[in-house]
Each structure stands twice: as structure tokens, then as C-alpha cells.
Image (spheres, rainbow, N blue to C red):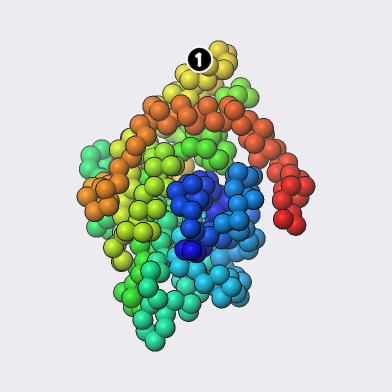
Amino acid sequence: MEKILVTGGAGFIGSNFIIYMLKQYENILIVNLDALTYCGNLENLSEVEDDPRYHFVKGSVTDSVLLEQLFIEYEFDKVVNFAAESHVDRAILNPNIFIETNVLGTAALLAAARQSWEKDSVYLPGVKFVQISTDEVYGSLGATGFFLETTPLDPHSPYSASKASADLLVKSYFDTYQMPINITRCSNNYGPYQFPEKLIPLMINNCLNHRSLPVYGDGLQVRDWLYVTDHCKAIDMVLNEGIPGEVYNIGGHNERTNIVIVKTIIEYISKVKDSEVTEQLITHVGDRKGHDRRYGVDPTKIKDALGWFPETSFDDGITRTIDWYLENYDWVKRITSGEYEQYYEHNYTNR
């Protein structure tokens, strides 16, 4: 049985990845280590919580003692590190938290993996450390072109700087200690279970409550959108087939401006749910500090090397996403009202 440590598995992408892997493979054990900060939500994993192949451990990746204990107890074959503070606005207000989790946490996790896997300067067969990163480490693009894996890192926010720092630490463990690692850098994800501070779920929630839809600046910032299940499939391929030491960009070639995203959400909700939701809810606000104008990654390398390609068009993915939030609006209300702490205490403690 292959044993995988997934850190940050109660978050948006991590929880989708755990569900995906348990559906794909019978003979695996997944241990989910998550500190359950504000955006970590065990309810995301309710459909697998009783699966004997899934174990949850509450704790931080910065806790070196706990990490050592977990590696001894479970003898992990692989690590997938999703654990990160990821909201740019929060990083601007308090960068130190991002440095602690994203940089020091990654350093602690690498050290624990090396201690467990390296025997007489040789690594155990089949082990792998996969660092889940972001296209934001590359900085900002002009109107044309795409980020390649060879594009120099040029982060512009405390968040992206902390992720770039973590990436360099992971790379150093390959260069210095020959640890089998991969780094994946994805474009903007969307889909079920995303915390409602991010653009798409925030706009859906605000539409349903007839609240203002805040759009930074002119709203013409361009992002490449990737449906979360396509991302999970790519990570699975990298985990099992990625060449050690390599970086893989994962993108959907679904570039849209922020204002187009917002108008798409308005149009769909107005049609299927509430005709009173209109573009009059849009409010342009002051632009974010250090706001990158455009991101876009070239996923040719992972397509050619591993055969991955995004299967979900944006039109299909955004419809699925909005429908999920409409059908699971009780989840949204618990998260946004602060009721989740009580829900967690009642349903998940002492499990």
C-alpha cells in the first residue's frame, strides 16, 4: 500500500486532490495534515472521512516534532505539499504569517522527509516530494507570451515571494541532497469547495446576497483559469511519472479578464436563479498594491512529457462551479458566517 502525506488537505485544492486520489486508486493510504486555519474545512472531505484509507491529523507543517512522529508512524512513500497561506490581500496586510507557513513550513517538511527517506546517502525507492506552487512566482506578463518553466522568478507580492522561496528550498534539496522532488506551478484554480474570499466564489456569494461586486481597478487583469479536477489529474501524473528535479507548469489556456469573469457569473445567476442580479452590482475599487496585470503559463512540457491536458472548458467548468455553490449554499453560509467552528466541534472532534 502506497502511503502519501498530503499537507493542507482540508483546503480547496488539497481536499479535491484527496477525493480524486481515493477514487482513482484502491491500494493507497492518505494522511491529511492540516492546521485548520480559517480556510481549512474538514466538511470538504465528508464523503471520505469514514474511508479506512484516509486519516486526518490536525497540526502544522512547522511542527518538526509532529512531522518526525508522522514519518516514523506511517513510513510515507510520497509527500504532496499544498499547505500554504495563499490570499494575496492577506499577505499584504501580514506577510510574516506567509513566511512562517510557506517558507519555514516547507523547510521543516523537507527536513523530515529527508531524515526518513535517505539511508546512507541513498533514497528509498519510489519516494517523491511534490511542491504545489503557483504561476505568481514568475511575476507579471505583458499582453503576449507565456511563462515557461525556465522563466526567471520575479515575484511581486509577499505571498508570491514566499512561494518562490519555498520553491527554491525544494530545488536545493534536489541539487544538494538528490532528493526526488517535483515542483508544479499552476494557474488560477476554480471549482467546488473554494473559500469564499477568492474571486469566483466571492462574486457568486455576493450575487446571491445582492451585495456589491468589488472589482479591482479597471478589471482588465488577465488570469488563466484551470478547473480544479484537471489540476488534480496533473498532480497525480507528476507524482507518479514526473522526472525527479523537474518543474511542470499546469495551465488551462482559459485566459479571461476579471471583469469578464464577474459578468459571466452575473449572467448565469440572473438566468437560472435570480433575475434581479445585474451588472449594476459591479463596483470598481482601488487597485491592489503590486497587482500583476497578466498571468499565463505554457503547459507544453507536461503535455509532451506526461500526456496531460486540461479536459474542462471554461464554459463548462464555470457552469459546474456556480451550480455547485447554488446547490451547497448552506456550506457557503457556514463558512462566511463563522459558524463552521461550531459545526466542526459538533461533527468532527474526537473522530
Q: Is residue 94 left or right of residue 240?
A: right
| Res 189 → quadrant | top left
- Does 278 appear above or below 331? above
Q: Position of residue 244 (x, y in %)?
A: 31, 66
Q: How many marks?
A: 1
Q: Give 227 or 255, whichever is nearer the viewer.
A: 227
What's the residue at 38%, 69% (across, down)?
A: 126
- Does 85 appear above or below 143? below
Residue pointed to by mark 1: 271
| Res 131 → quadrant | bottom left
Give the farthest residue toward the bottom: 120
Crowd class of label 1 (few under 14; some 14 to 19; many from 20; radius 10 Å): few
| Res 193 → quadrant | top right
| On-image quarter of the C terminus | bottom right
Secondary structure under the numbered disc 1 in the rendered image: helix
Amino acid type for the residue under numbered disc 1: Lys
**Could one spot residue 212 in this view of the protein?**
no
**Could one spot residue 62 in this view of the protein?**
yes
Q: Position of residue 45 (x, y in %)?
A: 60, 47
What's the residue at 40%, 28% (across, down)?
A: 316
Q: Position of residue 48 (x, y in %)?
A: 59, 48
Q: Position of residue 311 (x, y in %)?
A: 34, 37
What's the residue at 67%, 32% (across, down)?
A: 330
What's the residue at 61%, 71% (across, down)?
A: 66
